Image (cartoon, coloured by chain):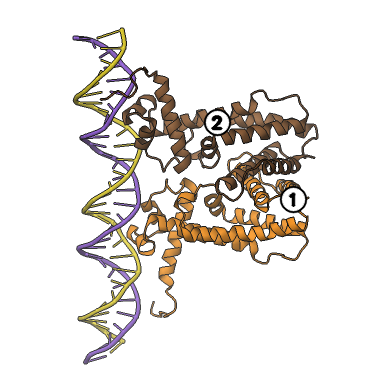
Chain colours: A orange, B brown, C yellow, D purple
Amino acid sequence: MRNQNQNEKSAPQDKRAAILFAALELFSERGVHGTAVPPVAERAGVGIGTIYRYFETKEALINAVYQQQRADLLNALRTDFPTFAPPREQFHAMWTRMLDYAQENPESLTFLELHHHRSYLDEKSREVEEEFFGWLNSHFQAAVRFQVFKDAPSELLIAIVKGAYVGMMRAAWDGRIELGPEVIKAAEDCCWEAIRR
Amino acid sequence: MRNQNQNEKSAPQDKRAAILFAALELFSERGVHGTAVPPVAERAGVGIGTIYRYFETKEALINAVYQQQRADLLNALRTDFPTFAPPREQFHAMWTRMLDYAQENPESLTFLELHHHRSYLDEKSREVEEEFFGWLNSHFQAAVRFQVFKDAPSELLIAIVKGAYVGMMRAAWDGRIELGPEVIKAAEDCCWEAIRR
DNA sequence: GTCAATAGAATGAATGTTCATTCAGTGGAG
DNA sequence: CTCCACTGAATGAACATTCATTCTATTGAC
């Protein structure tokens, strides 16, 4: 390879991305504390030392994975979101995006929602999380104000719907339910009735 | 060595219980993989070796904690449960018990519901878990059959309500909501409307 | 075009640390 | 004295991290 663009370092970014993806897979399977660094290197197809070229410490790697995945999920939610559609339609859009995301990125959702991160997230990670909740909140708050949703703290309604969603996903992963289209539709209706006025 | 309790002869079960409780506290805070054995011994006020008198390995200790807490939660749920009361009243009883339990045993709930256990639970732990879900299921299934609840798999309804409950707890834990009586009541109503026909 | 010089990316054996587990020793009860 | 629950220093395995070295590809002299 001879052509090297000044503004693009393609190879380094490939390795960085490979490390991030390998780490995501292992973290979602075994948890952050249950995952050693060498297996991450092995799965990414790079040397152990290479990880430390891109990430100062294991904790920095964890935070990079978290920020990437949280931002990715938020992006999946708000891309082409029908902000001015009727509330029920907006809710359907949100529900569909969440489910599509889970189906396409199961490791992302497992990592983000099935693990308890608080203790090792840094400032930046918290900001990214805040942006995520902020976006949800702006929509839920509006629906509460317009008396579409129940008169309750919007943060509570978010916690309930998000919790129900994660509970459903967890039950599916644990083999307690089968996620067919009718089940997904039934769950959407349940969640809508939970919060609608 | 110096004797810490002159006038108390320690029954073996005291130490076992102290170890289980110390382990529960640390596991709920830092997770199972994030908790080393020596700190468990220190918090329990016993020597490291004593832990291995009562539990063959760390994994055995984890499973003992899991079984104890899962059984404890089930017990809190079904003690004096109004099995023959009207459905809404039964639901209220369930909700109240869950919330009381969380308020009285926050570490238990954090450990049981905020961590991903599957990979290290043994046969016995799965049986205890099965008993827990079996009890919930018998009640939910009956309510579906009597057309009190929506016509959906009872396992889905359980996942939604339990998920919403855990989501609310997590939000409270993370400081996103304040768990006052009105909030708890509002959440109960949300969950009831989610599943009722 | 060729190739020696150079830069810096990549590596994994080596390092120091932390962990789960063991066991030789201690002390109290009978 | 005999037991045995109990202890924590000791052990070796596994860990996160480092760094001397190798590899790769770009440069510029000819």
| In front: label 2 or label 1 | 1
Where the N terminus of chain B falls, by quadrant? Answer: top left
Q: Residue at x 41, y 70 (%)?
A: A11
Quadrant of the image occupied by residue A144:
bottom right
Q: Quadrant of residue A53?
A: bottom left
Please tell me which residue lies in front, A14 or D19: D19
Of all chains, the one bearing label 2 is: B
Q: Is residue A54 left or right of residue A29?
A: left
Could you tell me if residue A93 is visible in this image?
no
- Name the chain letter of the residue that bears numbered label 1: A
Q: Is residue A82 left or right of residue A2?
A: right
Extreme residue toward the front, this view: B7
What residue type is disc 1 on?
A: Asp
Q: Is residue B197 above or below residue A85?
A: above
Q: Residue B93, percent across and down? A: 69, 31
Which quadrant holds residue A131?
bottom right
Residue shown at 41%/64% (left/top)?
A: A15
Q: Which quarter of the rendered picture does the C terminus of chain B lie within?
A: top right
A107 shown above or below A75: above
Query: Quick check: marks 2 and 1 in contact, CB under 8 Å?
Result: no
Rendered residue at 39%/55% (across/down): A58
Q: Identity of the amino acid at label 2?
A: Arg
Q: What label does residue A151 carry, if any?
A: 1
Q: Residue A96: give its label.
A: none
Q: Which residue is mark 2?
A: B70
**In the rendered image, residues at marks 2 and 1 fall on the same chain:** no
Q: Is residue A9 above or below residue B16?
A: below
Mark pair 2, 1: CA separation:
34 Å
Determine whether the residue tagged by mark 2 lies in a helix, strand or loop: helix
Task: Looking at the picture, tell me which residue is in the foreground, A12 or A123.
Answer: A123
Residue B116 horizontal/vertical position (percent): 51, 42
